[in-house]
Image (cartoon, coloured by chain):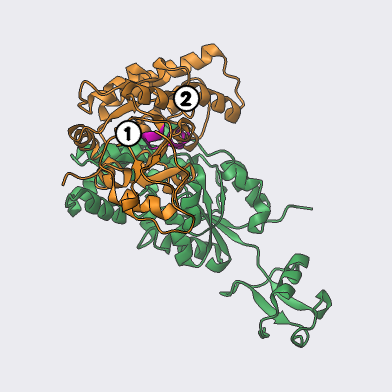
Chain colours: A orange, B green
Amino acid sequence: MSLAPAPPFNAIREMENHGCGRRCSRSSRRHEIAAASSPPVKGEAMTVQDGLDIQVPQPALLFDLDGTLVDSVYQHVIAWQEALATCGIELSVWRIHRRIGMSGGLFIDALSRETGVRLDEELSQRLRELHAQAYLHRHETVVPLPGARELLAHLHERQVPFAIATSGARHTAGSALALLGLPDDVPVVTRDLVERAKPDPHLFLAAARRLGADPAHCFVVGDSVWDLLAAQRAGALGIGLLSGGYGREELERSGAYRVYADPAEMLTRLEEVGVRPIR
Amino acid sequence: MSLAPAPPFNAIREMENHGCGRRCSRSSRRHEIAAASSPPVKGEAMTVQDGLDIQVPQPALLFDLDGTLVDSVYQHVIAWQEALATCGIELSVWRIHRRIGMSGGLFIDALSRETGVRLDEELSQRLRELHAQAYLHRHETVVPLPGARELLAHLHERQVPFAIATSGARHTAGSALALLGLPDDVPVVTRDLVERAKPDPHLFLAAARRLGADPAHCFVVGDSVWDLLAAQRAGALGIGLLSGGYGREELERSGAYRVYADPAEMLTRLEEVGVRPIR
């Protein structure tokens, strides 16, 4: 497929509005642009008949888990506070909240910087274990977020590819995943499967690969700025959800393409992320 | 004191920069402006010697309690979630978080609207009792926010008037207040002492009256949008703190004059709210 010089913006928009309806092979470019006729002379008006073949694949969706599909962020926050208190480390709870969803290693680094306490490998490991215990102690209060099950069921029915990518370890994520009733073929990438977690892009890149999708054609859906920063680094677009307790503007400033309250609201706006209603 | 026509802005700024150093009687106008000489001819440069007498009183500070001076917001959030779950009402935890600090009555109204569950007086009362029990059950994990005790001690030493105004009831606020080691003469206004709580202005108006201060010369210090909205309605300026878990932009958009991380940061920036360092 040869690439023609970029057409004027209006022509692209006109083509997109009419849609090409065909699925195309995945590519590392967001849009493949091919000219069926000669490129237009500069300044000459273009019409649909000129036949620019703009192919935009159906996007795939890469979901974060905690705060995005299940209502578990505040339980994680309190579990970290308990773990830190047990080790005699004081950190304001809102600062813990703003670190949830990022890599555990980076969380510990940030913790060390903010508290001035040097956290060696042994203490770090102890904190993680205490957090996991404290979280599992209250995981029975965790429920799916409104619309989460319905959103995933809808995507599955429409054959929109999606996967889950979480900074959580398999043993803490397991109980949350069980709430969602996921179809067997949905890829789930947990912390232990990749070298680095968010805001590094590894989790989302791995999830896209499991789907056979180009990250440039994926939307990352997450509740934290770490999801949205990782989305940028993966070359994907990001969708922010308020359901993890961040403010709308924090998510917008981290690069969110759109922000919704929760999965229930996202389900009513799916056309904004390229999932067309059945006609 | 007679009022002269408003002087040009540059002249006001020049006077403020030099300061008049005198305390003046409280007034419902933010600034009293008096001319010791005739008003200047338009376009004529003014100097300090022209003697415009600009009097700006030392501001008083009206503090919220939960999330502003003590690190208790997340415990309140989880306590409300428990109370609601006990009554079979599901509400996402982030939505509870965003309602903390507002009047209990308005909280129940909002809850009713968001869940579609009709909450009669009996159920509302039960929810409040269950919340109070659940909160008191975990109040031992509540600590003062960084810098809170130091900030209040500094203000007391500098004889800057301050008071506390909380939407919480006396019996839940008591344990939090005990952490602060307040001097005996600091007025504390709790929910049960006024007709309406935040975002209505009653709590802050009552606190200002207890100090004998004009609200127009007060700064309200709070962590929630409800504090800042109530500040506007009381005719006071608002200072937002991130320590309750709201985002900076949410507080700025609710009218915050300044936003700080927590009391510790505010203590290092007191000159921005008109509390001058001792020279």
Question: How far across and down, in percent of the image, does residue B103 sit?
Answer: 35, 55
Question: Would you name the residue on which mark 2 appears?
Answer: A103
Residue at 56% in and 44% down: B261
Q: Residue at x 39, y 31 (%)?
A: A27
Give residue B200's quadrant in the image: bottom left
The extreme front residue here reads A38
Q: What range of the chain is rendered magenta?
A: A216-229
Q: Is residue A72 visible?
A: no
- Mark 1 and mark 2: Cα distance apart in space: 21 Å
Q: Give the amino acid at mark 2.
A: Ser
The mark that comes first in sequence, 1 or 2, is 1
Q: Which mark is residue A114?
A: none
Q: How many marks?
A: 2
Badge 2 marks a residue whose secondary structure is loop
Check the image and name the residue furthest to the right: B49
**Callout 2: few (<14), some (14-19), or many (20+) C-alpha neighbours within 10 Å?**
many
Relative to the observer, which residue lies in front, A248 or B130?
A248
Q: Are marks 1 and 2 in contact (CB under 8 Å)?
A: no
Please say whether residue B209 is visible from this viewpoint. yes
Report if residue A218 lies within the magenta region. yes
Q: Is residue B197 magenta?
A: no
Image coordinates of residue A198 in percent, x first then y, are: 46, 27
The quadrant holding residue B86 is top left
Q: Which image quadrant for residue A176?
A: top left
Residue A6: where, in percent of width, then height?
47, 46
Q: Amino acid at mark 1?
A: Leu
Instruction: State the residue in front, A197 or A71.
Output: A197
Q: Chain of mark 1?
A: A
Mark nearest the camera among 1 and 2 is: 1
Q: Which residue is mark 1?
A: A61
